[in-house]
Image (cartoon, grey):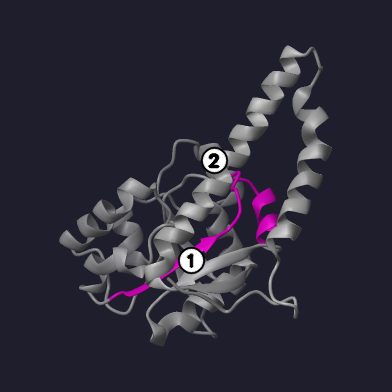
């Protein structure tokens, strides 16, 4: 990474994740060169004001760092499609955000000379500027080939996160853990809220708020927050 001129950052995927990460890197001093079109252009414009809206091919061709934040089942096809049209550039950084994939999913781009990085900030994104505060207290799973792992770690830090290395072979288990935490937490709260509503309790979401937060905090403490030093483990292996 160049520390003087910074990087030209492009974002493929204008859902809840990509624009927020672009805003975070923009706040760290990088230049935002483009973002692909999304379903909510007003929200994207609010968090990335003035950033040009380009198609994915142009974003890839113009950027030194490309953030690919697309749904899980679209990632491999998108990367391969951009390789087929010659959009990837030798020496370019390509960073995807999917929790379940490591750097290997970017192999079609690597064949064109790019540097593959997998960085997943472990927060539930809203797609708004509120996420920037959440990033500042979050961990990020980073996976990359050993020679370029420091680049992935540095980018995680610039996003505001504490990087934790997850080995390529451990990414499926990591992705399953993230999915489990997300899906079951949401499902249990919705189920409890429905039962409270049936019992006639008004505003069941608000009623559960303190209980849910304190229970979750206790469960996290019981699960362990890291070694005795208070630092997270440096590497998660498969």
> In the rendered image of this protein, does residue 139 appear above or below residue 199?
below
Confirm or deny contact between disc 1 and disc 2 (CB under 8 A).
no
Q: Secondary structure at mark 2?
A: helix
- Choose between 133 and 218: the one closer to the eye: 218
Q: Which residue is mark 1?
A: 119
Q: Which residues are magenta?
A: 114-135
Query: Residue 171's spot in the image, x, y percent?
Result: 42, 64
Residue 112: which quarter of the image?
Answer: bottom left
Residue placed farthest to the front in the image?
222
Q: Which residue is mark 2?
A: 183
Q: Secondary structure at mark 1?
A: strand
Q: Residues within 10 Å of mark 1 (few under 14, many from 20)?
A: many
Of badges 1 and 2, the one in the foreground is 2
- In the image, taking residue 193 as reference, residue 66 lies left or right, namely left
Taking the magenta stretch, the answer to whether it contains residue 115 is: yes
- Choose between 225 and 107: the one closer to the eye: 225
Q: Residues within 10 Å of mark 2 (few under 14, many from 20)?
A: few
- In the image, taking residue 67 as reference, residue 234 lies left or right, namely right
């Amino acid at each position: 990474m160049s520390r003087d001129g910074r990087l030209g950052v492009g974002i493929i995927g204008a859902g809840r994740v990509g624009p927020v990460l672009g805003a975070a890197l923009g706040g760290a001093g990088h230049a935002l060169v483009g973002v692909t079109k999304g379903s909510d252009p007003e929200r994207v414009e609010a968090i990335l004001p003035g950033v040009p809206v380009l198609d994915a091919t142009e974003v890839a061709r113009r950027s030194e760092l490309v953030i690919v934040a697309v749904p899980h089942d679209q990632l491999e096809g998108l990367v391969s499609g951009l390789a087929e049209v010659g959009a990837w550039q030798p020496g370019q950084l390509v960073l995807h955000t999917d929790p379940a994939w490591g750097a290997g999913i970017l192999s079609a781009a690597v064949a064109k000379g790019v540097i593959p990085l997998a960085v997943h900030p472990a927060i539930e994104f809203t797609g708004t500027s509120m996420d920037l505060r959440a990033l500042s207290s979050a961990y990020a799973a980073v996976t990359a080939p050993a020679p370029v792992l420091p680049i992935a770690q540095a980018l995680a830090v610039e996003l505001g996160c504490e990087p934790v290395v997850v080995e390529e072979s451990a990414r499926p288990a990591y992705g399953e853990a993230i999915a489990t935490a997300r899906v079951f937490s949401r499902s249990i709260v919705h189920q409890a809220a429905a039962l409270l509503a049936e019992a006639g309790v008004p505003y069941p979401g608000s009623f559960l708020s303190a209980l849910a937060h304190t229970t979750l905090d206790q469960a996290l403490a019981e699960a362990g927050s890291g070694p005795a030093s208070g630092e997270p483990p440096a590497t998660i292996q498969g």
